[in-house]
Amino acid sequence: MAKSLKRAAAFTALARALTAGSRGGPTLAERLGALPRMLLATTRGEYDGGVRLALMTAATVYVVSPIDAVPEMFVFLFGLIDDAVAVTWLAGAILAETERFLEWEKTRPRLVVK
């Protein structure tokens, strides 16, 4: 049940993100531009997105790796559905996490050292 709720949340985030620019939310370009900053902040330990980024990386590796070809060899339709679900979840997860990161960037305290 928890997995289906997470999937539903990712799909909902994808739908919201695709229309967010027209409603005053971050645009797709802003979200994609935030990815390198999010990776750097996570690497530095400033942002708590490590587990989510690891899951997104694993999904990306699965979709582009030869291991993903196994379902297509045996059950063609299942393999394609498998890819579609993985890519859709990945897109929704990236959009949701970049939105969360952009909010974090707005609210985090800034320290200026002179």
Image: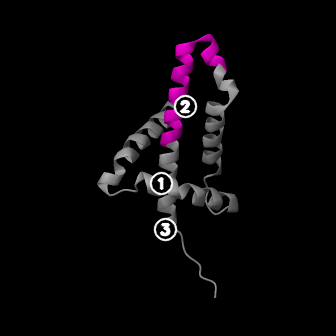
Q: Colour mode?
A: one colour
- Who's the residue at 64% across and 63% down the image? 46
- Who's the residue at 45% across and 35% down the image? 8
Disc 2 to disc 1, C-alpha distance? 20 Å
Q: Earlier in the sequence, mark 3 or mark 2?
A: 2
Element type where label 1 sits in the image: helix
Residue 65, quarter of picture: top right
Circle 1: residue type: Arg
**Residue ID for mark 3:** 107
Circle 2: residue type: Ala
- Who's the residue at 41% across and 39% down the image? 12
Residue 13, quarter of picture: top left
Query: In the rendered structure, which segment of residues is drawn in magenta?
Result: 70-92
Q: Position of residue 101 (x, y in %)?
A: 52, 57
**Residue ID for mark 1:** 31
Circle 3: residue type: Thr
**Residue ID for mark 2:** 86
Q: Is residue 25 left or right of residue 61?
A: left
Q: Which one is in front in this view, the residue at disc 3 or the one at disc 2?
A: 2
Magenta-colored stretch includes residue 27 = no
Q: Earlier in the sequence, mark 2 or mark 1?
A: 1
Q: Is residue 84 above or below residue 46?
A: above
Element type where label 3 sits in the image: helix
The total of numbered circles placed on residues is 3
Q: Is residue 106 above or below residue 61?
A: below
- Who's the residue at 68% across and 61% down the image? 45
Q: Label for residue 102?
A: none
Q: Is residue 23 left or right of residue 74?
A: left
Element type where label 2 sits in the image: helix
In terms of secondary structure, what is the magenta stretch mainly?
A: helix
